[in-house]
Image: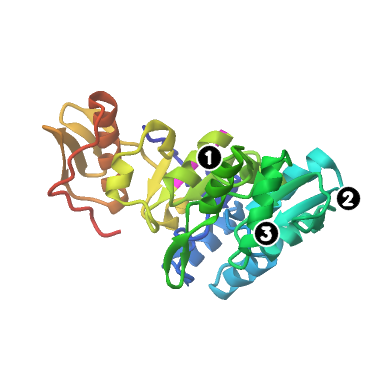
Amino acid sequence: MLGASDQPLCRAYDLVMLDLDGVVYVDGAAIPRAAESLAAARSEGARLAFITNNASRPAARVAERLRELGVEAGPEDVVTSAQAAARLLVDRYGEGARVVAVGADGLIDSLRAVGLEPVGVADEAVALVTGYGPDVVWSDLMQAAVRIHDGLPWVASNTDMTIPTAFGIAPGHGVQVDMLRRFAEVEPEVAGKPARPLLDETVRRVGGERPLMVGDRLDTDIEGARVAGCDSLLVLTGVTDLRVLTAAEPHLRPTYVAPDLAGLLEPQEGPVADGAGWTLGGWTARVVDGRLVVDGQGAAGDWWRVAAVASWTHLDEAGEAVDLSGVEAPAG
């Protein structure tokens, strides 16, 4: 159900791949303890890589923003879904290939960086790639849809259905991908999480033999880690709440759970089954008549771990998520 490590995760793994929004920052503001936790992990010898499904921003701009938040990072530490898409294309078609690019500067720059030639939507090309771009015009999407329908190979940077903005949660690139897919009746090759290329590109660029994926979303970060065959740490500073975590199917379950990035600096114990339920660090979790019950006292991270394992056990056996009425998760 959950893994265990007798040494801090930043020593057990030599590459820590970090999602950004909900992990390092939220709405552009640094998450408490994030910068100092990452600095401590790096001092223990872990390589850090910052990865994002957002294809609109060049890596240098992402690194600059991280430094403004107190997180040491250079462009070489940032890997985007645009870079992963560019790698897929150059490996397949070679340097100098002409590729229709429908997206923002981050996508264009990534194609040029590997020797591809980005061209307009009506130009001769060997393939077409799409990425999030708030200024993409409808006429370009119309022509892209027709070209995909007519057989031009298509790579999508990611399929995220939402994106956080200053004015709220807005439609992401996945909405555009869905529109193109339904019109053209073609499935794109996807570069970003949960597909594998972004994580593979991160390992290729940054190095490391024992990677750990750290994220806040089950359906991109954690599922992506499982697809890539690496362990994962779910942090609870982003979008995953108790309802989402306890209802997670096996392919969405993380290896470890921690309240925040300080979990990288700690060994990770797994809950132990006994006659009363699952126990860890002073907490006991069990499911009674379909309802989750957690008793005891201890660290917040241990509460979340026993609650998760007790709930997953019930889900696997009963085929339905636990009732969370009356359950209050501790402050992290």
Q: Are marks 2 and 1 in contact (CB under 8 Å)?
A: no
Range covered by the magenta-colored residues: 229-233
If you read the primary sequence from the N terminus, does the residue marked by circle 3 or circle 2 appear first?
2
Looking at the picture, tell me which residue is in the foreground, 41 or 77. 77
Q: Residue at x 67, y 47 (%)?
A: 146
Looking at the picture, tell me which residue is in the foreground, 17 or 162. 162
Q: Which mark is residue 86?
A: none
Instruction: Quickly name the residue at label 1.
Output: 225
- Image spot of residue 227 (x, y percent): 54, 34
Q: Nearer the viewer, mark 2 or mark 1?
A: 2
Query: What amino acid is at disc 1?
Result: Ala
Q: Considering the whole magenta stretch, tell me its main secondary structure.
A: strand
Instruction: Quickly name the residue at label 3.
Output: 140
Q: Nearer the viewer, mark 1 or mark 3?
A: 3
If you read the primary sequence from the N terminus, does the residue marked by circle 2 or circle 1 appear first?
2
Specify the farthest residue to the bottom.
68
Q: Is any part of residue 164 visible from this angle?
A: yes
Query: What amino acid is at disc 3?
Result: Asp
Looking at the picture, tell me which residue is in the foreground, 215 or 136. 136
Determine whether 263 is above or below 135 in the image.
above
Instruction: Quickly name the residue at label 2.
Output: 96
